[in-house]
Image: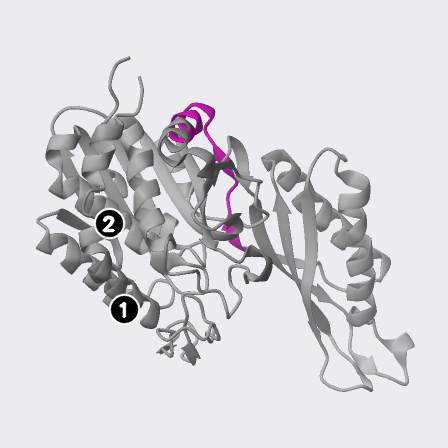
Amino acid sequence: MTLNLEAVSTLLSDLDSTRPAREDLYEHFHRTPELSMQEDETSARIRAELEAAGVDVRPVGRTGLVAVIENGAGPVVAMRGDIDGLPVREVSGKPYASTATQVNEATGEETPVAHACGHDFHIMGLLGACLAFQQHRDAWQGTFIGVFQPAEETAAGARDMVESGIAEAMPKPDVYLGQHVLASVPGGAVATTAGPVLSAAASIRVVVHGKGSHGSMPELGVDPVVLASAIVMRLQTIVSREVAARETAVVTVGAIHAGTKSNIIPASAELLINTRAYNSDVEKHIHEAIERIIRQECAAARSPQDPEFTYYDAYPLTDNNVDVTAAVRGAFDAYFGEKSLDLTPVPASEDFSIIPDALGVPYTYWGIGGFADMANAPGNHNPAFAPDLQPTLDLGVQAAVVAAAAWLTTKDT
């Protein structure tokens, strides 16, 4: 089987004529980002655009959407586009920069919001692909499914769609696809690789207990600040002494909270820990080691109470299927030529794989370049992150269509 470039050309034949409208719509999404699980207006606008083109759109959960475009017998290809913004004040200097604020329903606090991770490009890439497949049915056969997923930034959106019945809302896909705009990929290029491509990650809230006392009488208390300090140093030995050199892992203590006054020994301390790994067994070992070390340090410090562990913001490993990745890479090579590159695994994390794993479907995930000036490009989540409008906007549509076309427009050789 080989990619049908003539069919792909037909599917992408509207890029020039639709560019002004797509740029306007992109700027709308960029100006009006919404927080995770609160993407009500974003979801409504996506749905309106799809329904205006005659696409069958099905809500899944509060803000998730599934667009199903059936076009006869053939493969079923699904693609994810995440739609949420971040609680960040944008400083990109773009004329269409976000000045939006939104009340966080979880905290009741108003916060600035920005698309500082590029999800507005993901919306537009998937939306453009849906419209291309809807409007050029003579160029392909099968079923294309667009999954507009909320709350990637909090690792809640994919799980919410699974729990809200995404399996019943669409035909079971043969493959599941996803893409992300990155500063680490050259502008105008696409990049992918087989195997682990994004790390598994989890955050752990740990509370260790001491015994309060006056600072002048430490012998009457158990100091959780000293205990927490000892834990931080001991945790550094996990990666250096318990993880094989051939593996990659990170253990970060991002915050310690304890006490209110210099001469009071507090009764407890809180540590916020983050872990990253490209291997599920390594991740499991790291978590077991963290709990083992903390429990033993608490015992050594005479802690009067067992430590408490709360795991949250858990992201699974993104492990690209070899066969699916080979098919997409072949299509990218055929269409993009020298701009089809190898993707270096990224030490960031995603909830992308939760849906295909729940459905029992193989997947692949790739990066698209967002900046011509890579040397000065801000990274994802930076308040200045706002990729070049073009060619990034067109590239998102092209990559989505070409990848899906590896199944939907192939021809015998």
Q: Residue at x 70, y 36 (%)?
A: 247
> Does the image show residue 286?
yes
| Quarter holding residue 234 | bottom right
Tell me where residue 330 appears, x and y as whole percent: 40, 26
Check residue 177 for magenta coloring.
no
Give the extent of the magenta segment: 312-329
* 361 with respect to 130 (left or right): right
Q: Residue at x 48, y 39 (%)?
A: 191
Q: Residue furthest top?
A: 413
Say if 96 sits above or below 133 in the image.
Answer: below
Quadrant into which the C terminus falls: top left
Q: Residue at x 38, y 26 (%)?
A: 327
Q: Mark on residue 28? A: 1
Instruction: Check if mark 1's residue and mark 2's residue have beta carbons within 8 Å.
Output: no
Give the class, few, some or many, for how many residues have Cα within 10 Å of label 1's Cα (few <14, many ≥20). Answer: some
Amino acid type, callout 2: Gly
Q: Which residue is mark 2?
A: 128
Give the class, few, some or many, for how many residues have Cα within 10 Å of label 2's Cα (few <14, many ≥20). Answer: many
